[in-house]
Image (cartoon, rainbow, N blue to C red):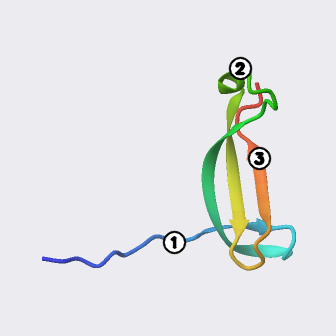
Amino acid sequence: MATKNQGFEAITELCDNCGRETAHQVSVEIRTESQKQENAEFSREPYRVSECESCGEETIQRMNNA
């Protein structure tokens, strides 16, 4: 029996560009911080990326501030 995907509620956050709470696409990305190829694998950190679905404004925040 096939079932319909009920989906999920969009994440709403304050958008500085729109000036109001809007739906956002949120993801976590692993980014390399080092510009050098040598030892680049040791400079990867997780970042939270949030994109406003209304205006496209993207905010990026480093999640590990060690």
Measured as percent of width and height from the top left, residue 27 is found at 60, 54
Looking at the rendered structure, the kind of residue marked 2 is Asn
Q: Is residue 2 above or below residue 59?
A: below
Q: Residues within 10 Å of mark 2 (few under 14, many from 20)?
A: few
Determine the CA span between mark 3 and mark 1.
22 Å
15 lies left or right of 12: right
Name the residue tied to disc 3: 61
Figure check: 30 above or below 13: above
Residue 44's spot in the image, x, y percent?
A: 68, 31
* Kind of element beneath mark 2: loop
Give the residue displayed 78% in from the left and 57% down from the top: 59
List the residue tagged with mark 1: 9
Circle 1 Cα neighbour tier, 10 Å, few/some/many (<14 / 14–19 / ≥20)? few
Measure the C-alpha gap from mark 3 to mark 2: 23 Å
Locate residue 52: give its quadrant: bottom right
Residue at 77%, 30% in the rendered image? 65
Q: Splitting the image into 4 quarters, where does residue 12 fall?
A: bottom right
Q: Which mark is residue 26?
A: none
Q: Nearer the viewer, residue 43 or 38?
A: 38
Kind of residue sitting beneath label 1: Glu
Tag nearer the camera, 3 or 2: 2
Residue 28 x/y as whole percent = 61, 48
Vertical relation: 20 (above or below) 59:
below
Query: Does label 1 or label 2 sit earlier along the sequence?
Result: 1
Mark 3 and mark 2 lie on one chain; the one further toward the N terminus is 2
Instruction: Count residues near mark 3 (Cα–Cα under 10 Å), then give few for <14, some for 14-19, many for 20+.
Output: few
Q: Amino acid at mark 3?
A: Gln
In this rendering, position of residue 2 left or right of residue 18: left
The one of 52 and 10 positioned closer to us in this rendering: 52
Quarter of the image with the N terminus in it: bottom left
